[in-house]
Amino acid sequence: MTDILTKIYDEATLTITVIVILLVMFLAQYLLRRAFKRFEKSRVHTELEDTTNYRFLYYALLALIYVTGIGFAIWNIPSLKHVAQSMLASAGILAVVVGFAAQQALGNIVSGIFIVIFKPYRINDRLTIQDTLRGIVEDINLRHTIIRNFENQRIIIPNSIISNEILVNSNYTDDKLCKFINVGISYGSDIDKAKQIMTEEVQDHPLNIDVRSEEDIESGVPRVMVRVTVLGESSVNIRAWAWASDPQNAFVMECELLESIKKRFDKEGIIIPFPQRTISYLGKRRPES
């Protein structure tokens, strides 16, 4: 009778121990999540502030909590101890199998660590990948990078893949962006007047910024550069250099400038040409008499 009670007591103790370990694990990850959110709100005040290190550290600590909790739970179960010991007998084969199975996962983790250390991009950076994928970095975790494109879709790319890609980062070290405002006018239109209109529209736009140095201002460098770039088949192409504080403002500025310049051109009599075709019909040749 005593043996039965002892066995029941041991099993109950084991069950309670495992439950307590799992509860502590879930409580730890809950407290970590709350602490991280509170810390992030207190440190991050703008969307452009770097949160990459905080996020990656959070995911690393979360993984450590889960691995430690599950490991302690397994260690306290005697039956699983014997299984672990038998597996250790073939540790060499197991290591090879696990190595092949986890090669890609470990590669993603290592690539994620390198991304956080060397920072080719950060959270909230605007990336262009392979000239086709464009979006804002939303998250970087142990396995992959999440990019939100401009249609509000999420692009999930493993860290080991994106770390080997050629990226265009619009926010790398400097958020300012220059937009080329290209407009074609007809050969009969006044070039000087068109350049003056484009200069005024760019300079008066509220999102346009002055990137000139003090030396440039003293030497008379204009705030807005406007140049004729191409003499095309049917148009004279003019380009204005318009600077904005960040890519988002640059896109809005470009769209509004194209509209305002078009309206000014229409008002001032500057013609924007479009392709035209002249078709002539040849009648039937009359027979010679």
Image (tube, helix red, strand yellow):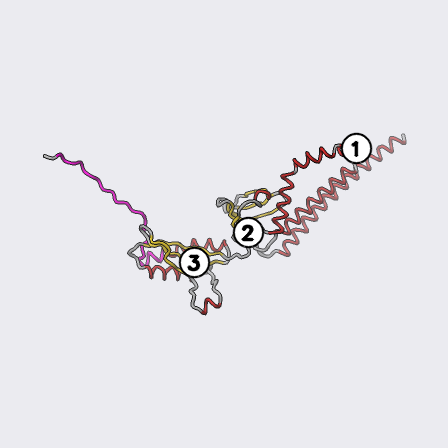
Amino acid type of the residue tagged 3 in the rendering: Trp
Secondary element under disc 2, as helix, strand or loop, is loop
* Distance CA(mark 1)–CA(mark 3): 72 Å
Badge 2 density bin: few <14, some 14–19, many ≥20, Cα 10 Å: many
Q: Is residue 215 above or below residue 97?
A: below
Badge 3 density bin: few <14, some 14–19, many ≥20, Cα 10 Å: some
Verify whether residue 269 appears in magenta: yes
Amino acid type of the residue tagged 1 in the rendering: His
Span highlighted in magenta in the image = 262-287
Query: How many circles with numbers are drawn on the protein?
Result: 3
User: What main secondary structure does the magenta stretch of the protein show?
Assistant: loop
User: Residue 149 appears at what percent x and percent y?
Assistant: 52, 46
For the N terminus, which image quadrant?
A: top right
The residue at which mark 2 appears reads as: 125
Q: Identify which residue, 17 or 265, lies in the foreground.
A: 265
Verify whether residue 279 appears in magenta: yes
* Distance CA(mark 2)–CA(mark 1): 50 Å
Name the outermost residue toward the bottom: 218
Which one is in front in this view, the residue at disc 2 or the one at disc 3? Answer: 3
The residue at which mark 3 appears reads as: 241
The residue at which mark 1 appears reads as: 82
Which residue lies at the image location 62% right of the left edge and 48% below the top edge? 114
Which residue lies at the image location 48% right of the left edge and 45% below the top edge? 131
User: Residue 185 appears at what percent x and percent y?
Assistant: 33, 54
* Residue 260, disc: none
**Among numbered discs 2 and 1, the one appearing first in the sequence:** 1
